[in-house]
Image: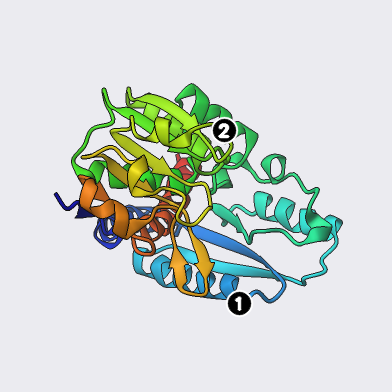
């Protein structure tokens, strides 16, 4: 058996078509969805990401602007910029370049960004809405992982799902989304004793630990669906948390890195912008 490779581009393109239609309807009502990217300093990777995001934004009809702050911006000026963006009626989504520089390390974005404009799903309000299963902004990576599971043709309902990772933007939210679809969910991490014993029980394995090659062939149940959200830049290129070549022959479906979760995450970020714009008008 050789698994199906779940390419993210096809799913992302489908999402983009839907967003373009929704953005056009908003424009007919006099409002173009708008994203503000708050950049800090002169980061090459951040510039590259902003360029890719700008291209997709233009394609789906979302306006994107950038608020560039110096790398040594003090906490007061940074917070003032976020508060001003919260109050700007033309802005529907606020994306802050991460990670924050050391002098902003104590800044609590979870309480600073307006919940409606929180397109990363990191505020306390949106985390609570996710936990309660009520509408709110969901973290884009978690949404992307669920979209790929749907694309695999395997239902979460009734499945045994194992999540590796417990971050607030990947592990925790994807576990909640799986629970809401009636999966039986186990959340693990790099400190879990005998991690392989847990992962071998999974019909659905969601991985986001940030450790290259963490998941090897002996850790995967035959016929499982494996969704890898890990991204690490190495001297050999960008790699995921799953040893892809080892695991591919064993599974029903698996995502590549790069090219799996990543393209859909960007599309889901813009989905949150459009959803915010719709809520703002509604």
In the image: residue 129, left or right of residue 125: left
Residue corresponding to mark 2: 127
Is the Cβ of the residue at disc 2 closer than 8 Å to that at disc 1? no
Q: Residues within 10 Å of mark 1 (few under 14, many from 20)?
A: few
In the image: residue 47, left or right of residue 85: left
Q: Position of residue 16 (x, y in %)?
A: 31, 59
On residue 57, which mark appears? none
Label 2 secondary element: helix
Name the residue rendered at 83%, 59% in the picture.
103
The furthest residue to the left: 1
In the image: residue 216, left or right of residue 211: left
Label 1 secondary element: helix
Measured in 3D between alpha carbons, the distance from the residue under mark 2 to the one under mark 1, in whole angstroms, is 30 Å
On residue 44, which mark appears? 1
Name the residue rendered at 72%, 72% in the picture.
41
For the C terminus, give its image quadrant: top left
**Looking at this view, is 196 or 71 the one in front?**
196
Q: Position of residue 29 (x, y in %)?
A: 39, 53
**Looking at this view, is 42 or 249 the one in front?**
249
191 is higher (above) or lower (below) than 207: above
**Looking at this view, is 250 or 165 the one in front?**
250
Indicate which label's residue lies in the foreground, 2 or 1.
1
Q: How is the image coloured?
A: rainbow
**Looking at this view, is 248 or 10 the one in front?**
248
229 is higher (above) or lower (below) than 64: above
Determine which quarter of the picture holds residue 14: bottom left
Q: Is residue 20 visible?
A: no
Q: Is residue 165 visible?
A: yes
Q: Position of residue 182 (x, y in %)?
A: 32, 22
Numbered circles on residues, count = 2
Nearest to N terminus: mark 2 or mark 1 = 1
Q: Position of residue 17 (x, y in %)?
A: 26, 58
């Amino acid at each position: 058996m050789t698994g199906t490779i779940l390419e993210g581009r096809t799913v992302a393109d489908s999402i983009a078509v839907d967003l373009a239609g929704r953005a056009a309807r908003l424009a007919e009502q006099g409002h173009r969805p708008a994203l503000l990217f708050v950049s800090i300093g002169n980061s090459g990777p951040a510039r590259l990401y902003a360029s890719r995001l700008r291209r997709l934004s233009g394609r789906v009809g979302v306006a994107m602007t950038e608020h560039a702050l110096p790398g040594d911006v003090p906490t007061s000026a940074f917070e003032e910029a976020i508060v001003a963006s919260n109050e700007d009626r033309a802005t529907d989504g606020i994306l802050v370049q991460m990670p924050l520089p050391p002098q902003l390390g104590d800044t609590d974005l979870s309480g600073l960004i307006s919940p409606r404009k929180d397109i990363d799903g990191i505020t306390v309000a949106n985390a609570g809405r996710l936990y309660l299963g009520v509408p709110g902004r969901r973290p884009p990576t978690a949404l992307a992982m669920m979209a790929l599971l749907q694309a695999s043709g395997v239902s979460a309902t009734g499945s045994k799902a194992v999540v590796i990772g417990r971050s607030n933007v990947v592990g925790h939210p994807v576990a909640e989304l799986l629970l809401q679809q009636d999966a039986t969910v186990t959340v693990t991490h790099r400190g879990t004793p005998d991690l392989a014993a847990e992962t071998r029980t999974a019909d659905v394995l969601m991985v986001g630990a940030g450790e290259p090659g963490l998941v090897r062939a002996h850790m995967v149940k035959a016929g499982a669906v494996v969704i890898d959200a890990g991204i690490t830049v190495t001297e050999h290129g960008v790699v995921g948390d799953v040893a892809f070549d080892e695991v591919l022959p064993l599974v029903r479906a698996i995502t590549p890195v790069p090219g799996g979760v990543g393209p859909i995450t960007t599309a889901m970020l813009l989905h949150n912008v459009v959803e915010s714009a719709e809520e703002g008008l509604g």
